[in-house]
Image (cartoon, rainbow, N blue to C red):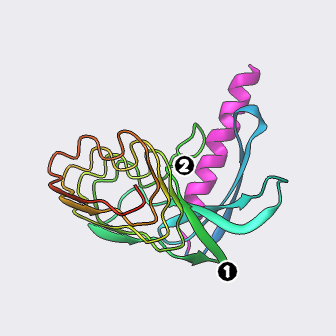
Amino acid sequence: MHILKIKMKMVLAVSLSAVMLLGTGFTTVGQFVGTGGISVSATVGSNFAYSENKDENGNENGTVTVWGTADNYDKISINIPSSIDGKTVTTVSDHTSEYYTRNFRGNKDIISVSIPNTVKTIRTCAFYGCSSIIKLNLGNGISKIETSAFRNCTNLRTVTLPDSLTKLDTGTFSYCDNLEIVNIGSGL
């Protein structure tokens, strides 16, 4: 019975969040507490949500991690901002969890992705299954692209990895069947 009450509370929280997404501008949609008491506070804008990054002492460090918020785009280009609300965007994430599933992952309407120089990390599965992506612009600040970040981006044809990239995890571009040209920067 206790588990059912928790699930019902999460369904209500997610439903309220979806209603709040219909507004304009950035809106805080609340805090979700996941397994092990991990708390994620999300703020949303037109196509992005973000959470503030913290240093090793748990203090906010003026940077944020972004992820997508719209389930259905209309064949658009995603331009990750270099800052949101005065905070530098340093990470692009999948941010799929049991409680919060909106993201870029699997969105077949995204045709182009541009990531600014401020971004250092593209997390695991961030754009997994975005099969319509044909153009990818990676900023010169990226140092790490994690596992399967662009897996199953089947229409991607050319990728230029920046000189700043020093870590490219396995499977990052797996099943990108039409990928013909990969320009590898000096950092790898």
* Image mark for residue 86: 1
- Comparing 36 with 62, the one in front is 62
The amino acid pointed to by label 2 is His
The residue located at (28%, 54%) in the rendering is 108
The amino acid pointed to by label 1 is Gly
Residue 106 against residue 67 in the figure, above or below: above
Residue 143 against residue 171 in the figure, above or below: below
Q: Residues within 10 Å of mark 2 (few under 14, many from 20)?
A: many
Task: Give the quadrant of the N terminus.
Answer: top right
- Comparing 93 with 167, the one in front is 167
Q: Magenta-highlighted stretch: main secondary structure?
A: helix
Task: Give the quadrant of the C terminus.
Answer: bottom left
Q: Was residue 14 drawn as part of the magenta stretch in this picture?
A: yes
Residue 168 seen anywhere in this rendered image of the structure: yes
Q: Residues within 10 Å of mark 1 (few under 14, many from 20)?
A: few
- Mark 1 and mark 2 lie on one chain; the one further toward the N terminus is 1
- How far apart are labels 1 and 2 at the CA level? 22 Å
- The image shows residue 166 at horizontal and vertical percentages of 47, 55
- The image shows residue 19 at horizontal and vertical percentages of 57, 59
| Disc 2 element | loop
The residue located at (18%, 52%) in the rendering is 179
The residue located at (47%, 45%) in the rendering is 124
Q: Which residues are magenta?
A: 1-23
| Disc 1 element | loop
- Tags 1 and 2 touching, CB below 8 Å: no
Classify residue 13 as left or right of residue 131.
right
Classify residue 52 as left or right of residue 44.
right
Would you name the residue on which mark 2 appears?
95
